[in-house]
Structure formats: structure tokens, C-alpha cells
Image (cartoon, rainbow, N blue to C red):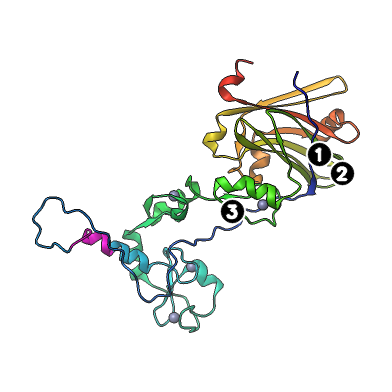
Amino acid sequence: MLPRRQSAPALAPQQSRVPPKTQEQQNKQEGDGQVALQRQPQQAEGTNSSNVLCERPKETVISDFLVSLLECPVCFGYMMPPIMQCSRGHLICSSCRHKLNVCPVCRVTLTNIRNLAMEKVASKLIFPCKHTCYGCRMRLSYTDKKTHEEDCEFRPYFCPYPDEKCVWQGPLKDVYKHLVTTHENVITMDGNDIIFLATNVNLEGALDWTMIQSCHGRHFLLSLEKIHLGEGCQQYFAACRMIGSMRDASDFVYNISLEANNRTLKWQSKPRSIRESFVAFTNADFLVLNKSTVELFSEDGNLALNVIISKANDAGEE
Ligand SMILES: [Zn+2]
Ligand SMILES: [Zn+2]
Ligand SMILES: [Zn+2]
Ligand SMILES: [Zn+2]
């Protein structure tokens, strides 16, 4: 039997969190003035074209030019219908329009004028995914763009720590570093068989306990969430989420077992990915414990969860 190590996870009051809004920062461009056309030389395809100066297909150059015209001067995202403009013709995206009273370019008071011609142009163009800066190479029509971006595998990860004040987001490779440097009370334990000790589980209010388990060359976020469902009714959600994509997480299996007072409770499932937000907690297939179960298994107000993480292939052989 492997030795069990004790952890002392920190404890922080917590309510449900709302993912922060994504900011579009790529393709920064100055105002609505000059538009730089990128001309990249392209090999001639063995034709004796008289137009030797034509480096890229003319349609691509025009299309890139039109796409660049559709960059909002405020948020640098692409303007999608409805596209608004000031009385002097400066374009602005509809979400920035809602936040402003004057034109960001000429300061004239904004009214609600739509630019139908540019809306038609936008409906015919192919736009780069907004996660281009994170490595996505997809180009999509405006009707497909939003759906793709919400599910794009390159989209940045939000901080998975249950603190709604933290608005950090970034690439997967930086998530672990962010957690241990910014959220100092998140401790890491190495090993595939550890004890996640949640202290003072009976304290009033919505609380959470979080720690990181490192094994199999990966990091997993262990959480115990205490949620208030009303007068005297509390539920605890115990979850193991991988700091990785959903695809990566499917390679593993985790077991949680509780043992105390001659009782045993075991749970086995596949880890979720930190892609899945805390809001989804109550619907997800995590281990759910009610107050009286927690009382049965806790000793001196502390609940010890034995967490074992295995590779999915190996789990069946044990
Ligand atoms: Zn905008
Ligand atoms: Zn203007
Ligand atoms: Zn994408
Ligand atoms: Zn954070």
C-alpha cells in the first residue's frame, strides 16, 4: 500500500463565477486611415502570364483589403452586421456602439445609422478566426465565425481557480504557472495516489477547496465545492479536472474514495478538462455528496478524499 501524504488545502469563500469577456487584440491597426496590404510573392505556375507583377490572386488582395476595412477602430475585432457608422461615415461595431456616445474617430455624437453596404460586403467575406494569435489558421464566413470561435481549440483558457475576481486567460502552457504564482494557497502534490484533505468542511456558507495533483507528467486540478441550495440544504461536489484539453483528459481515469467510521464510498470517472467552467458544475457528472454523507465521512470537521489518477488503458488491469 502506498504511503498517503497529507495536504492542507487552503479555503476560500466562493460563489459562482462568470467567465470574463474575451478581448480581441489581434490585427491591431491605426484608426480608419491607411490600410496596409500584405503582398506576398507567389510562384508563377508555369504560365506565361503577361502580368508578371501580379503576386497574389487579385481576389485575395481585394478580399484582404475589404476584411481590413471591417476592423473596428475601438476593439479591433471584425465588424459584423449590424454595422454602425457616425454621421460622417466612420464605422464602428455594434457592441462598441452600445458603449459609446461619440464617434471614436471624429467625436461627432453618434446616432443609430447602419451601413447596409458594408453589411452586405461582410456577409460575402471570409474572416480569420479571432484566435489567430494563438495559432488557429481557420478562415470562416461571418455566420460560421462565432460558432467556430466558441469551440476553437486554440481559444485561450480562463483561470480555473474559483475566484471570480481573477480574469486571467492565456494559453494552456501558462495555466499551471498562473495558478501557483497568483493563487498562492493552491498547493501541488506529486504522485498518482494522494490525500486531498479538505479542512473545516462544516463551516457555513459556500466554500471551496482546491489543490493540484501532478502525475503522469500532467497536472490535475482537484476541487471540492460546497454549494448552498437553500435553507439547511448543502451539497458538495468533488471534481478532478485536467489542466489540458478535453481530448487529453479522456486518456485518464480518476478514483475518489472516502473511508471513515467503518464506511467506504468509492467513485470512478474520467477527469473533465478545465475548459469546463464552474457554472457547469451542478450538471456535470462529478461526485456529489450531501451534508449528512459528509458528516459521516469527516473526522474533526476534516474530509479526506483519497484521489488516485491512472492512465485510462492501465485502469482496467488494476
Ligand atoms: Zn468594436
Ligand atoms: Zn466619425
Ligand atoms: Zn479558431
Ligand atoms: Zn487566476
* Segment colored magenta: 54-62
Between residue 16 and residue 249, name the one nearer to us.
249
Q: Residue at the location (50% across, 72% down)?
A: 97
Q: Of the two numbered discs 1 and 2 on the same chain, state the one appearing first in sequence.
A: 1
Q: Image quadrant for the N terminus? A: top right
Type of the residue with mark 2? Leu
Mark 3 residue crowding within 10 angstroms, few (<14) / some (14–19) / many (20+): some
Q: Is residue 64 left or right of residue 265?
A: left
Count every numbered label the image shows and give the total.
Answer: 3
Type of the residue with mark 3? Gln
Q: Of the two numbered discs 3 and 1 on the same chain, state the one appearing first in sequence.
A: 1
Residue situated furthest top in the rendering = 317
CA distance for labels 1 and 2:
16 Å
Q: Is residue 264 left or right of residue 68?
A: right
Between residue 27 and residue 87, name the one nearer to us.
27
Mark 1 residue crowding within 10 angstroms, few (<14) / some (14–19) / many (20+): some
Residue occupied by mark 2: 203
Give the structural element (helix, strand or loop) at label 3.
Answer: strand
Q: Image quadrant for the C terminus? A: top right
Between residue 50 and residue 316, name the one nearer to us.
50
Where residue 295 appears, as percent x and y from the top left, is 86, 32
Residue occupied by mark 3: 169
CA distance for labels 3 and 1:
27 Å
Which disc is residue 198 wearing? Answer: none
